[in-house]
Image (spheres, grey):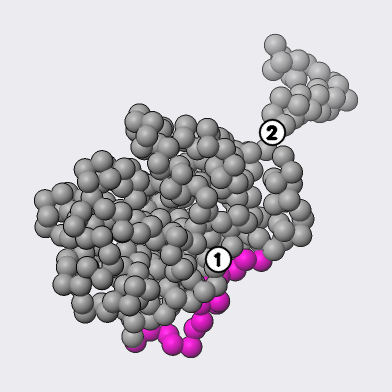
């Protein structure tokens, strides 16, 4: 019918019909298109709570984003994704970003959601004091990563040398817990839900790394600097959504437990409560980097890559100008006032 009207209408009426159709389409489709982005993260653990909140509460869509979230185990693979443009945002510890930066990759950290190690130092039941770690075997996920650095910083805080213990690469949290259970190692860094199971089995929680003096950029949001220059507006929208996710998770235990129940696929209420209580209060809002922790991690990475660029500083790795803008615009204040 509409086609017949267009064919038979006079020129003046034709213009009127076309304008009417365009206006109608505009009214029916007045919502802006969502920007598709790919977000990578490194594993399944309680400190991924802000990202899960960002997705589950549709905060990405609230800020105009349509995210595809992918888990990529191994820092090198996610860095390659950033550099190739297949990944837009990478959530990981700062160490793989720093390693890439020292080797010439033009990456930048735009936000830091967690400035504390999310691990507990779990030991065999007979090890009750840090001094008893001397001569013992400690399992870590890999050398050169946040596990490795956390152990080194804990040993330093306790007055123990690295040479006084043996570090063994035992893989992910499940494998570290298994090695601890089989007494293949004497200690390991674990986080909930593994720590809940460890306590139930009689293992000792020697210390929570988040309660120690050491700061560390455990969860940073990194992007390709070229992408930041080209799509600064989009990066800003992501930071807004991610920041609201952090604040929401920190403020609501009920919401947090629901988020963890779904994403950890865990029904045990005790485990869910332990997970939330263990980590929720340690997130950073606004998501700024702890400068001391940043420099500590930077110096640690420098030891791993002695031939890398020595003229760089840790501060050159971060760009918090978007967070500064949001602060001036009152965005963080508006979330606190809700």
Would you say 90 lies left or right of 315 here? left
How far apart in space, not on screen, are marks 1 and 2 (Cα)? 35 Å
Residue 151: tell me if it is visible: yes
Residue 169: tell me if it is visible: no
Would you say 306 lies left or right of 220 here? left
The secondary element bearing badge 1 is classed as loop
Q: Report the front residue among 253 and 266.
A: 253
Residue at the image position 74 percent from the left and 19 percent from the top: 7
Instruction: Tell us which disc is closer to us: 1 or 2.
Output: 1
Residue farthest toward the right in the current orientation of the protein: 12
- Labels 1 & 2 near each other (Cβ < 8 A): no
Which quarter of the figure has residue 140? Answer: bottom left
What label does residue 185 carry, if any?
none
Q: Is residue 10 above or below residue 316?
A: above
Query: Residue 26 location, x and y as percent?
Result: 74, 30
Would you say 278 lies left or right of 5 here? left
Query: Residue 219 location, x and y as percent?
Result: 46, 58
Residue at the image position 44 percent from the left and 87 percent from the top: 310
Which quarter of the figure has residue 123? Answer: bottom left
Q: Residues within 10 Å of mark 2 (few under 14, many from 20)?
A: few
What label does residue 289 carry, if any?
1
Q: Is residue 32 above or below residue 73?
A: above
Residue at the image position 47 percent from the left and 32 percent from the top: 258
Q: Which residue is mark 2?
A: 31
Q: Report the front residue among 119 and 245.
A: 119
Placement of the N terminus among the 4 image quadrants = top right
């Amino acid at each position: 019918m509409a086609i017949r009207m267009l064919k038979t209408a006079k020129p003046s009426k034709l213009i009127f019909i076309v304008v009417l159709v365009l206006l109608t389409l505009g009214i029916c489709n007045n919502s802006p298109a969502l920007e598709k982005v790919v977000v990578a993260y490194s594993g399944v653990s309680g400190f991924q709570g802000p990202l899960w909140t960002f997705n589950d509460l549709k905060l990405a869509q609230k800020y105009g984003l349509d995210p595809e979230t992918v888990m990529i185990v191994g820092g090198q693979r996610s860095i390659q994704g950033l550099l190739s443009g297949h990944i837009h945002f990478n959530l990981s510890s700062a160490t793989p970003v720093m390693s890439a930066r020292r080797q010439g990759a033009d990456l930048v950290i735009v936000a830091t959601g967690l400035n504390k190690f999310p691990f507990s130092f779990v030991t065999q039941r007979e090890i009750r004091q840090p001094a008893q770690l001397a001569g013992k075997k400690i399992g870590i996920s890999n050398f050169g990563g946040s596990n490795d650095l956390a152990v080194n910083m804990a040993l330093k805080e306790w007055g123990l040398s690295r040479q006084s213990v043996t570090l063994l690469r035992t893989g992910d949290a499940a494998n570290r817990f298994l090695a601890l259970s089989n007494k293949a190692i004497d200690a390991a860094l674990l986080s909930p839900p593994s720590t809940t199971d460890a306590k139930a089995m009689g293992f000792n929680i020697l210390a929570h790394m988040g309660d120690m003096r050491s700061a560390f950029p455990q969860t940073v949001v990194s992007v390709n600097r070229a992408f930041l220059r080209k799509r600064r507006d989009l990066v800003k929208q992501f930071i807004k959504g991610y920041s609201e996710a952090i604040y929401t998770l920190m403020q609501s235990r009920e919401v947090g437990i629901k988020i963890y129940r779904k994403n950890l696929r865990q029904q045990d209420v005790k485990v869910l409560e332990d997970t939330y209580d263990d980590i929720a209060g340690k997130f950073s809002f606004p998501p700024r980097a702890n400068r001391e922790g940043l420099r500590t991690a930077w110096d640690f990475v420098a030891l791993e890559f002695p031939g890398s660029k020595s003229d760089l500083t840790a501060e050159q790795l971060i760009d918090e100008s978007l967070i500064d803008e949001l602060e001036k615009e009152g965005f963080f204040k508006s979330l606190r006032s809700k």
